[in-house]
Amino acid sequence: MATKAYILIKVKAGKGKSVLTALKGIAGVEQIHACFGQPDIFVFINVADERALSDVVITRIHSIEGVEETDTHIVAET
């Protein structure tokens, strides 16, 4: 069953545009929203399972230059 999540991302000052560009290239990312305040970016992702989500967050997102921290919220299906 697919895993959907919201990933809240804090970005270093001046790195917002480059982080947004890098996020657009990640498979499963369906929506990206830059915001005023904290967090700086909201991402909605839809991947195969929690293992795939973990891989995206830890391997892909955390390796983007300018990403300071993430906060991941898995969507509870109702």
Image (cartoon, rainbow, N blue to C red):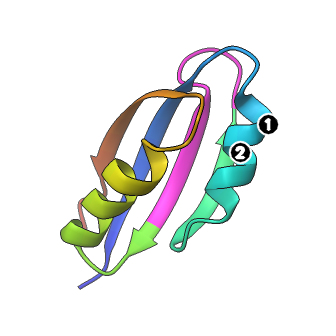
Q: Is residue 32 above or below residue 40?
A: below
Label 2 belongs to which residue?
A: 20
Displayed quadrant of residue 17: top right
Residue 78 in view of the camera: no
Q: Is residue 17 left or right of residue 34?
A: right
Q: Is residue 4 above or below residue 58?
A: below
Q: Secondary structure at mark 2?
A: helix
Query: Which residue shows up at 30% across the image and 80% down it?
Result: 2
Q: CA distance from mark 1 to mark 2?
A: 5 Å
**Mark 1–mark 2 CB contact (< 8 Å):** yes
Q: Nearer the viewer, residue 37 or 51?
A: 51
Q: Is residue 53 left or right of residue 27?
A: left
In magenta, the rendered stretch is 35-45
The C terminus appears in which quarter of the rendering? bottom left
Residue 1 locus on image (x, y percent): 23, 85
Q: Secondary structure at mark 1?
A: helix
Q: Nearer the viewer, residue 66 or 32?
A: 66
In reply to whether residue 12 is colored magenta, the answer given is no
Residue 30 locus on image (x, y percent): 60, 67
Query: Which residue shows up at 23% across the image and 60% down it?
Result: 76
Query: Which residue shows up at 47% across the image and 48% down it?
Result: 61
Label tally? 2
Label 1 belongs to which residue?
A: 17
Q: At label 1, which amino acid type do we have?
A: Lys
Residue 55 locus on image (x, y percent): 30, 62
